[in-house]
Image (cartoon, rainbow, N blue to C red):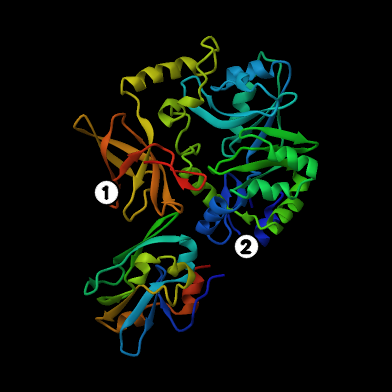
Amino acid sequence: MSSFPDDLKYAATHEWVRVETDGTVVMGISDHAQELLGDIVFIELPEEGAEVAAEQEMSVVESVKAASDIYAPITGTIVEVNKALIDAPETVNSSPYDEGWFCRIQPNNAADIDALLDADAYAKICE
Amino acid sequence: MGLRTPLYQKHVDAGAKLVDFGGWDMPIQYKSLIEEHNAVRQHAGVFDVSHMTVVDIDGVDASKWLRYLLANDVQKLDEVGRALYSGMLNDNGGVVDDLIVYRRAQGYRLVVNCGTREKDLSWMNVKAQGFEVSITERPDLAILAIHGPESISKVCALLAPELAEKVQALGNFRSLEDQQWFIARTGYTGERGLELIIPNEDAPALWDSLLAANIAPIGLGARDTLRLEAGMNLYGHDMDEDTSPIAANMEQTIAWEPSDRQFIGRPAVEQHKIDLAAGKLPILTGLVLEERGVLREGLRVVCEVNGVEKEGVITSGTFSPTLKHSIALARIPAGSVNCRVDLRGKLTPVRIVKPNFVRFGKKIFE
């Protein structure tokens, strides 16, 4: 079964976010998303410094079976990307909420985060 | 709920992700497609392919009829147990299905695809008119394919010594029968291995003993990546009723001699051969993308023929777990050069190679 940690917020398009103490937001894709995709073989990450807009495409994940767009959960600026995923994309399968994080975003508007789903609401749409 | 093989509960117990496959609830993967793929390339894996259709052909006209029904020639099967791969063509030279035919002590055994079962059986029955043959489907039989460099020795360790010795000695595309068990050196992975066609009631215990012998359960997801690395066609993707075997890299599976053997579709495929030589028929070729990205079925291929831009299409594509880059089969105009694939709107150059990528665990194209 997929896991849905309570301390995260989720987008209906299967991204998760975690608010850090410095106000930045770390994001990745959910356990449910990695299960649906299967073995991930390539990840195209956004550039550091790029501006991303909520609900707009920001990244592409390719698994053996399918290619999938990843959407920015909030509007902001990419301040860091997880470069380890370029050579080890399978980390997203093994550790979607921890080592498999995608990038860190400086949000433009903190209210974007409140608009996301909590774990229970997200788990419901994955049923 | 779909149809279930006698191993359905075993798949559930092994944690399989089950999907509908031609009306059957089949395991697409257990834990990781890539790990399953590598298990077959490096060690041994077992596939439940009981959804495939076994059809036994008997009767005094069995040989005569199969020589009419199939593009390959069962006359080549000069010993009991020998097998060959063939297309079963329609009158237009399209592929009704592809199959393996085994010669038995009496009659023949065919294994045809699952998704084409009904049309195959009705096609066979219609085409059997005027021949003294019986066509008997065998839903009472399960099929387990065990493939990989360690597969044969691991299976033989589970068999009675006398039978194990015979199985060890089996050549490629050979089979033997021991009471109700049919054991063949055939498969769909590009590795050494066996296909065991056995009574349904024997399947669960065999499955358990194979897993206990450290043979990994392999889903249909890895079956597809393995066959594509081996350059083997998948019916309904790389060829179908509207595709000539000549345009599907199957010319070698057509027995042209003796020239007076009138098999179904012969006049059409003879014309296709002429068309191919004249550059009027597309070819099925291999494509390789060595940079990041994955070639996928249905993607547009843009190529050049004598300086003119033409188009083709990818018929099967995947990331190759063995090669760690993407490979594909594509149908493109004969004489194409400078192929590029439309990857998310970006025309990305790909290399044209012979449609065989991996055999016995190793890269085989230049």
Q: Specify the quadrant of the image occupied by residue B341.
A: top left
Residue mark closest to the camera, 1 vs 2:
1
Query: What residue type is disc 2 on?
Result: Gly
Q: State the residue at coordinates (68%, 31%).
A: B55
Q: Which residue is mark 2?
A: B15
Instruction: Report in which chain the residue with disc 1 lies.
Output: B
Viewport quadrant of the C terminus of chain B: top left
**Location of mark 1 (residue):** B348
The residue sitting at 43% across, 61% down in the picture is: A40
Point 74% across, 52% down: residue: B204
As displayed, is residue B326 above or below residue B128? below
Looking at the image, residue A127 lies above or below residue A107: above
How packed mark 1 is, by other alpha carbons closer than 10 Å (few <14, some 14-19, many 20 or more), is some
Q: Is residue B297 visible?
A: no
Q: Earlier in the sequence, mark 1 or mark 2?
A: 2
Q: Nearer the viewer, residue B127 or A112?
A: B127
Task: Quote the CA–CA distance across marks 1 and 2.
Answer: 38 Å
